[in-house]
Amino acid sequence: MSNQKLVLRETTEEDDENNNNIHHPYAFHVSGPRKVSAPNWRDLINSSWKDGNYKRTVIACFIQAVYLLELDRQENRSQEQALAPKWFIPFKYKLSRTLIDERDGSIYGAILEWDRSAALSDFIVIRPSGAPRAVLALRGTLLKGPTLRRDIEDDLRFLAWESLKGSVRFNGALEALKLISDAYGSHNVAVAGHSLGAGFALQIGKSLAKQGLFIETHLFNPPSVSLAMSLKNVGEKAVVVWQKVKSLVSSSNSNSNSNSNSNSNSNSNSNNANATSTCSNPIAFNKWVPHLYVNNSDYICCYYTDASGGGGEKENMRPPSAGNGHLAAKLFVLSKGKQKFMEAHGLEQWWSDDLELELALQSSKLISKQLKSLHSSTMNRQ
């Protein structure tokens, strides 16, 4: 009799945990998109992926899955209880690989691949037109203890140096993107990120563009450095803080980072050599057109919408649409009036049912600054 009671009590506890997951605020059916359908056999005729709104929504869900992969890890959820898979399985994608920061064990990115077996079970015999064969998704800063230190370190690195190339995560993400590009062809893959992850996605996408690999790129709330550029003291303080954070890293990690930086520098030199030949062709350069999704109320990314770049610089830079008439980037702007920062910077807004975006074609010096190294060799050779 006592054994029976024990079994009943254990079953109840397990059921309670499952119920908590069902009603979890990050569960797909609780906070995910409402009006986005899963792929079906009709997509063989007219693919949903050809719709820019559909593609933006699904890729934003993929990035949310990366956030949840790390939360699932931190909270020790089993495979059956995990929240992350629900954010990509409905769209017929599967988890191929996670990107792990070996310093703290955190998941900062993931490769999601088209799941042919799952698609065939729903009579989808071929991948819909426009659906990437694989997507590299990168999360942003996660304000949780186990990963906070490394996330903030990269945030400060970007604010201080306008670059993430010294980060271990940069090298890992670049290697992963190159791997799937070599495997499936650059035209069949995409890279996407939110916040800090968008910063990584922009820079690794640019690095491969210099090598002639033009990856479809989606950047949600990408960080801009113009805030620090406008407030010089903030930028200077960021350098000091970043140095202090860096000093906390053990000497062994510092040696590892040094090796990574030297490899990064050698790769950078190689990339620059490749860029000379690749970027000397203006038509080839314009094959890489990243998509930026920006909220005017988000002070981290809003300067992308400022034609002056926010920093008041007088340097003559190529605007997003100039010269040969091609766009350097597609800038989608969301304006909802005055919003709180967390709402304006949040990822969930990008799959909202009432989302209204404006494709901004005005010149943005900040975009030009981010892409300057891509076209500088082009202009020098002309």
Image (cartoon, rainbow, N blue to C red):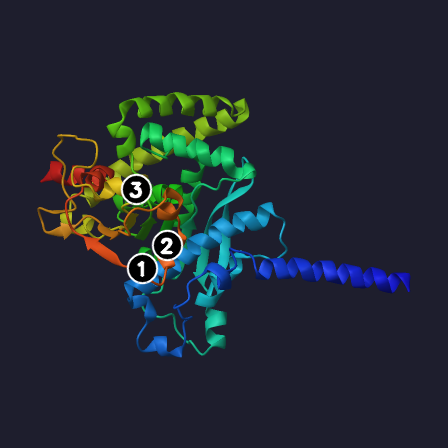
The extreme front residue here reads 338
> Is residue 194 among what the camera can see?
no
Circles 2 and 1, Cβ within 8 Å, touching? The answer is yes
Q: Pointer 1: residues within 10 angstroms few (<14), some, or many (20+)?
A: few
Position of 10 compared to 79: left or right?
right
Kindly identify which residue carries mark 1.
355
Q: Secondary structure at mark 2?
A: helix
Q: Is residue 369 or residue 312 the one in the foreground?
A: 312
Q: Which is in the foreground here, disc 2 or disc 3?
A: 2
Residue 8 — which label? Answer: none
Which residue is depicted at the point 86% across and 65% down? 4
Position of 154 compared to 83: left or right?
left
In whole angstroms, how far apart are the C-alphas of marks 2 and 3? 14 Å
- Residue 255 image point, x, y percent: 49, 25
Position of 302 compared to 286: left or right?
right
Position of 104 compared to 233: left or right?
right
Which residue is depicted at the point 34% across and 49% down? 220
Q: Secondary structure at mark 1?
A: loop
Q: Is residue 233 or residue 277 the one in the foreground?
A: 233
Residue 301 — which label? Answer: 3
Tell me which numbered mark, 1 or 3, is placed earlier along the sequence. Answer: 3
Identified by mark 1, the residue type is Leu
Q: Is residue 58 or residue 119 the one in the foreground?
A: 58
Q: Secondary structure at mark 3?
A: loop
In whole angstroms, how far apart are the C-alphas of marks 1 and 3? 18 Å
Circles 2 and 3, Cβ within 8 Å, touching? The answer is no
Q: Quadrant of residue 313?
A: top left
Q: Pointer 3: residues within 10 angstroms few (<14), some, or many (20+)?
A: many
Kindly identify which residue carries mark 2.
349
